[in-house]
Amino acid sequence: MHRSSESTAGNRLLDALPDDERTRLVAHLDRVTLSLGDFIYGPGGCLDHIYFPTTSVVSLLYTMEDGMTAEMGLAGNDGAVGIALFLGGDTTPNRAVVQLAGSAYRMAANIVRQEFARGGPLQYLLLRYTQALITQISQTAVCNRLHSVEQRLCRWLLLSRDRVETDELAMTQEFISNMLGGRRESVTVAAGRLQDAGLIRYSRGHISIIDRRGLEAGVCECYRIVRDEYDRLFGADVSPA
């Protein structure tokens, strides 16, 4: 993880802040570079920072006693990683792992708590984001129970693409299978079908989305529910009353 200073945003939560609030908070934000597979936090570990991804995507994963993993949700330029800091939990039983390498801003835990306690615009936006994330986590549970691996892969690719705003995703099928909570063989078959249909191209850990509309046509309703709820909560009028 590499660190540098930065004065602009690129994260939708930070961008939604009033100009004066964002300017004031810049002094408390460090820009860091996250590499694929980096751990943001682990089960029961103390959270030292909250992260606001810009070009990276972080997966929220749960690992069972037998080593099997499944993704509960993901966060990119739409939100934040480490919501336990302002919800009062301090630790969580899951872990957060960088799914797509890129940049993020981070804010120290003590500053997060101070800012949240002020009850200003940042608190308002973080609470709205938490509602959107709860919707995503809930819908992921439903999707993993009721929908095919192919539909879940379409959902996962679209959610990831929306949060990095590029059609090029550096990702192995093994990593994807960990995210989806399925066997690598099942993901390989599903990815092969999407590739045969001309929707994606997969090669050596790199996935290119060729036909976004085709993915949207094949995805289950879970993707749209998550997207629409976020759009509802962060529409044109997102300012505190």
Image (cartoon, rainbow, N blue to C red):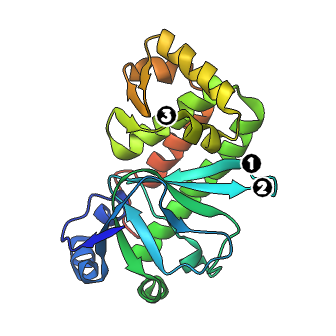
Q: Residue 217 carries which label?
A: none
Q: In this view, does 16 lie above or below 224?
A: below
- Using the image as rendered, state which of residue 204 and residue 194 is in the foreground: 204
Question: Looking at the picture, how far across and down is residue 120, in whole percent?
Answer: 40, 80
**Gap between marks 2 and 1 measured at Cα:** 5 Å
Residue hosting label 3: 157
- Residue 19, located in which quarter of the rendered image? bottom left
- State the residue position of label 1: 68
- Mark identifier at residue 64: 2
Q: Residue at x 41, y 87 (%)?
A: 111
Q: Looking at the image, can residue 182 be seen?
A: yes
Front one among 148 and 129: 148
Q: Where is residue 140 in the image (x, y as percent from the top left)?
A: 66, 43
The x and y percentages for residue 9 are 25, 63
Image location of residue 51, percent across then percent down: 42, 68
Please, what secondary structure does the residue beneath circle 3 have?
A: helix
Within 10 Å of disc 1 (Cα), the crowding (few <14, some 14-19, many 20+) is few
Q: How crowded is mark 2: few (under 14 residues within 10 Å), some or many (20 or more)?
A: few
Residue found at x 60% / y 49%: 136
